[in-house]
Image (cartoon, rainbow, N blue to C red):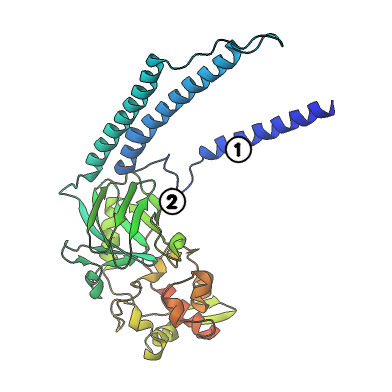
């Protein structure tokens, strides 16, 4: 009885574990590829992944069915039964198990090439956006020509250009063409629910076109190992209704207003005006790395900080945006994201708590009245 109870317990645990795995696979998680909202990802899912899945199910059923049939049909019925007659080789079976996999591979190849051809098409009417990958963050340049889209020049060099970092804004229902560039090492652009993976290679330009079908915030990643903080190289795609996207572009081009207001952080009151003055101090080196439109800050090393208060995340997706998390990042960047360039300049203790509070108030004050959709 005790042994039987142990077996039943093991079976129950196995059933529970299997059920949990099945249920987990059905969840609409932010990075799943099974729930798609873009034409590029839809083709990958419906025209390649699902046919391959059903073919795999068919192969599984046939193989396991043959195994079960063999075990039952040829099981030993008597303890002293003689060994059955042994046979070696069967030409028909060998031809079948050679031809069948070849047909499956051929079908998968045709499906893959069809989807690759469809996803490689670049609609001439598509909105052009330049994406530049850096270790370890993404930069997005809007309204630039192919020649201006360059990781070392072009829009990034102009404080008047429309540039965002870590947040990519696109309109719903309109094709966008992303020109993919890399500033340092190889990266990979991947928005699981909107578009498949595309390499970003230094010295080589790739293109990716896709269209979001519903408003929403979509998580995205670098899908190619690119160094120490690769796992923390993320961004968000914010898909807005066309009229909201047009309004966002118009307002984003406006120079941020003169910084005013206060923020309570680190148990202190941060003052935006003091933070603006602190940011402009040459010895703090903020302006050496960053651009803020309408100010003397014209750095070309780090992300563009114009309208920083509208960011969804801090440190390229590591922390959700909040003044507390921004203070945590500015106190010790290396502790939040290992290997980042800012951590070489700002060490723990470089800035006093009051200086951090003032800088947080300044950056948080640069906001636009944009209503962001829900995360998909």
> Image quadrant of residue 145?
bottom left
* Rendering coords of residue 25 (x, y %): 52, 38
Residue at 41 percent across and 27 percent down: it is 54
* Rendering coords of residue 135 (x, y %): 38, 67
- Helix, strand or loop at label 1? It is helix
Placement of 256 over or under 80, stated as above or below = below
- Helix, strand or loop at label 2? It is loop
Which of these two is toward me, 123 or 358? Answer: 123
Upstream in sequence: badge 1 or badge 2? 1
Furthest residue to the right? 1
Residue at 42 percent across and 84 percent down: it is 273
Q: How many residues crowd around disc 2 within 10 Å: few (fewer than 14), some, or many (20 or more)?
A: few
| Total numbered badges shown on the rendered structure | 2
Placement of 216 over or under 152, stated as above or below = above
Placement of 2 over or under 32, stated as above or below = above
Question: Alpha-carbon distance for marks 1 and 2?
Answer: 27 Å
* Rendering coords of residue 122 (x, y %): 19, 47
- Residue behind mark 2: 374
Q: Quadrant of the N terminus?
A: top right
Residue 261 can be seen, yes or no: no
């Amino acid at each position: 009885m005790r042994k039987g109870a142990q077996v039943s317990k093991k079976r129950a645990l196995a059933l529970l574990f299997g059920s949990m795995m099945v249920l987990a696979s059905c969840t609409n998680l932010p990075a799943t590829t099974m729930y798609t909202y873009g034409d590029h990802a839809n083709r990958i899912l419906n025209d390649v992944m699902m046919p391959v899945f059903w073919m795999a199910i068919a192969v599984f059923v046939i193989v396991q069915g043959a195994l079960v049939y063999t075990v039952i049909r040829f099981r030993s019925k008597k303890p002293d039964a003689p060994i059955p007659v042994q046979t070696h080789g069967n030409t028909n079976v060998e031809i079948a198990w050679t031809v069948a996999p070849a047909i499956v591979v051929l079908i998968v190849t045709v499906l893959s090439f069809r989807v690759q051809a469809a996803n490689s098409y670049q609609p001439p009417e598509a909105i052009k956006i330049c994406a530049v990958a850096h270790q370890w963050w993404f930069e997005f340049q809007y309204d630039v020509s192919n020649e201006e889209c360059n990781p070392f020049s072009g829009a990034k060099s102009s404080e008047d250009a429309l540039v965002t970092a870590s947040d990519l804004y696109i309109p719903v229902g309109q094709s966008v063409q992303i020109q993919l560039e890399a500033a340092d090492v190889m990266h990979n652009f991947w928005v699981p629910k909107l578009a498949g993976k595309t390499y970003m290679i230094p010295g080589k330009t790739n293109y990716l076109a896709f269209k979001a079908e519903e408003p929403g915030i979509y998580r995205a990643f670098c899908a190619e190992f690119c160094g120490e903080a690769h796992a923390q190289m993320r961004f968000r795609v914010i898909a807005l209704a066309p009229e909201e996207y047009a309004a966002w572009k118009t307002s984003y081009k406006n120079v941020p207003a003169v910084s005013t207001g206060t923020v309570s952080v680190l148990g202190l009151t941060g003052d935006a005006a003091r933070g603006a003055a602190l940011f402009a101090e040459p010895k703090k080196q903020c302006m050496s790395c960053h651009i803020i439109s309408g100010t003397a800050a014209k750095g070309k090393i780090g992300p563009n900080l114009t309208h920083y208060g509208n960011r969804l995340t801090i440190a390229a997706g590591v922390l959700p945006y909040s003044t507390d998390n921004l203070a945590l990042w500015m106190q010790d960047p290396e502790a939040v994201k290992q290997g980042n360039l800012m951590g070489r300049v700002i060490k723990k203790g470089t800035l006093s708590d009051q200086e951090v509070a003032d800088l947080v108030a300044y950056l948080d004050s640069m906001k636009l009245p944009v209503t962001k959709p829900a995360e998909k």
